[in-house]
Image (spheres, helix red, strand yellow):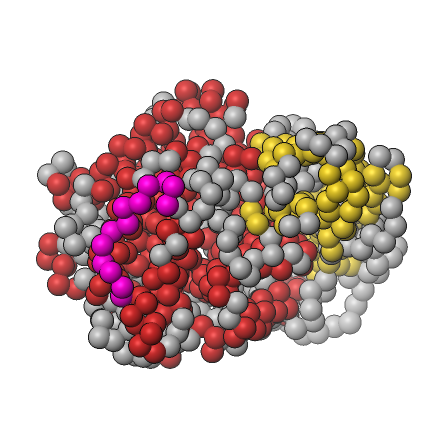
Amino acid sequence: MVDPVSRRQFLRSAISMTAASYLPGGDFLAQAIRGPSSSWQGDDSSMHTSGWQNAGIEDLTKSPHAKLHQVPIRAVTIKSGFWGRRRQANVANSIPTMHDLLEANGRMNNFRRLVGKSSAQQTGPVYSDSDVYKWTEAVGFALQSGDLPELRQMTEKIIDDIVAVQQADGYLNTYYVEDRASLRMLPQTQSTGHELYNIGHMLQGAIAYYRATGERKLLDAGIRFVNDFLLPNYGPAPSKPIVSGHPEIEMALIELYRITADKRHLNLAGYILEGDARAPFPERRTIYMFSGTPFTSRTKLEGHAVRAMYACCGATDYYMETGDANYWRTLNTLWNDMVSTKMYVSGGVGSRSEGEAFGDAYELPNFRAYGESCAAIGNMMWNWRMLSATGDAKFTDVMERALYNGINSGMSLDGTLYCYRNPLAFDPSTGDKIRNPWYDTTCCPPNLERILASLPGYFYSTTSDGIYVHLYDNSELSWRLEDGTPIKIVQKTNYPWDGVVDISISPAKASQFTLHLRIPGWTEDAQVNVNGKALAGITPGQYLPLNRTWVSGDVVRLQIDMHPQMLIANSRVVEDTGRVALQRGPLVYCMEEMDQPAGTRLVDIAIDATHGSQPGFQSEFKPDVLDGVVVLRHDGVLFERSSGERLLYSQYVQRPQKTKRIPLLFIPYYAWANRQPSAMEVWTPLFRS
């Protein structure tokens, strides 16, 4: 989010009650981008989509190279269960308290002061406007799941304050005004000043709010910025250079194109992805920005992790609209680089604090892991797009891994504290406080809020031949097949604590179609039956196509093996040598020191694997622990250290290690740091006598 040099009660009771219910190249492109400069003034009937209420997180209805089409958030109701609890905390606690913090830290006064409604000075970093826009997007997604009148009323007041400061030429930014106005949109400012990043988030917030309410005030302001300010002035020669210092604008422009059908929006996104040679930057800068050079020239993930993920999101969107084979080749090269050498077992990405950056291949430290919440979110968003382009379950597996672990860890269980970074080992004696209510760079909290608010939109997709089921939780889909047949799908499950998922299928009339049922890649075994009849040919890591004539009341039962597994890292991940990580279902586990025998330090214990390579674990649901979790128990050993072993260096002497057996307890990684400060580790040493 930042450059290496710098980064780092609103009616809550009423809301709680509601929540509980609840192309690069040439002159042709230059002309295509510039085009007429007038703002879009169409009514809903002129929109590119079938209606503002029917679009998903993205509207891929007319995207020619999208295999899957998304369903609206409002079409899926997540009921009581794992994600239901998290989403209720998000609406009842997270979004309201973040509003109060945005106010208390001057984010809205940055707007009000420009129209004489506040005497406060500008406060916060150059990207502070985006904090408000991401919060607005979270509200937009939340409103797509149900009416929250108090929250809507407050948001519309904020939207009024935003649009009031838009200038006559369409420009809107609270930082590059007054004595900074002369710096506006200079190439160097674009590379560090987040002007396009801010407007990208404004567009995404405006689109989410429009799809929730039909209200276009913020959307029209965003279109004015693009059509009246950007397009007439920036792009291919003879216009001024345009640079994406922090990728975000690319996917926003493409989603705007999907609404307006104005191809200039798509073309401008393509031009930005290509990079503008008239604005040269040192190689280290284009690596860090993950922009400024042609996206298709990239061969590995490097630089700022969030920037890289957002660039990949925009490039995947561009591919789904254009089918450019060079983009698809590059996207697959980068995806393979990530999952093979640069992704944490939690689904987090970004190894280095310096530059919030990817490291080298297999550079995956634990204590020093950065794993910014926004980067894990970007990983999920990218894999969602890759899944939409292909229908390949390998992308869903990564999406689920990031969601349940690297993203879910970013918000406290009560929804009021946030992790900016998500390490895989932690020692509170350093003085670091990992969960906080506010960061001056507060990108992660509203980003987490928008993911939880939009979560229903990730559960299903449609295709011409049927429906894909991606995620599992107690939920109900009320939507339609692509031939127009209404359908209801109800999931009943205790996932992820239990591996049994019952799915009832109820089309409005008997219909032949394919239900593509995801079999998670992490399981060793899965069984499927339809109306009690067992099926064969089930392969983990793939979608199981169930093609038949479905009638109301048909039931599919999926039984997934949830046996705890010990995972080992590639031998080139040196920090994990001799260590294992535990996984049960989609959840990665960790140890907190407070759960181990009194006086035990994590640095002195190991899992006892004396009796085999896959020793038995005991799984136990504890309703009174961390809002209700399955804990894992296993025998461990405590090393009795000699005085010499506590020295920094000592002479090697071959002697048997003195140990004693102790019980170990593991909790889901997402739930760590929700009690008292305690040391934590994901990768635990393995001991064999």
Question: How many numbered discs sit on the rendered protein?
Answer: 0
Residue drawn at 78 percent across, 61 percent down: 657
Q: Is residue 205 above or below residue 384?
A: above
Q: Nearer the viewer, residue 169 or 298?
A: 169
Q: Label the magenta part by its dominant secondary structure.
A: loop
How far from the left and from the top, in percent, is residue 593?
Answer: 62, 45
Q: Position of residue 674 (x, y in %)?
A: 54, 38
- In the image, is 551 to the left or to the right of 406? right
Instruction: Name the residue at 52% across, 26% down.
Output: 22
Q: Quadrant of the N terminus?
A: bottom left
Q: Is residue 268 visible?
A: yes
Compared with residue 390, is residue 76 higher up or lower down, i.e. above or below? above
Q: Is residue 545 magenta?
A: no
Q: In terms of depth relative to the viewer, which is nearer, 9 or 499?
A: 499
Is residue 352 depicted above or below 519 in this figure? below
Q: On the rendered structure, is 624 left or right of 12?
A: right
Q: Quadrant of the C terminus?
A: bottom right
Give the left or right position of residue 385, taking residue 660 as reference: left
The residue at the point 52 percent across, 30 percent down is: 88
In the depicted view, which residue is nearer to us: 654 or 594? 594
Region rendered in magenta: 34-46
Q: Position of residue 280 (x, y in %)?
A: 30, 79
Identify the residue shown where x is 47% and y is 78%: 297
| Residue 421 is at least partly visible in this image | no
610, 266: nearer the viewer: 266
Q: Position of residue 515 (x, y in %)?
A: 72, 45
The part of the image, by quadrant, that contains residue 548 is: top right
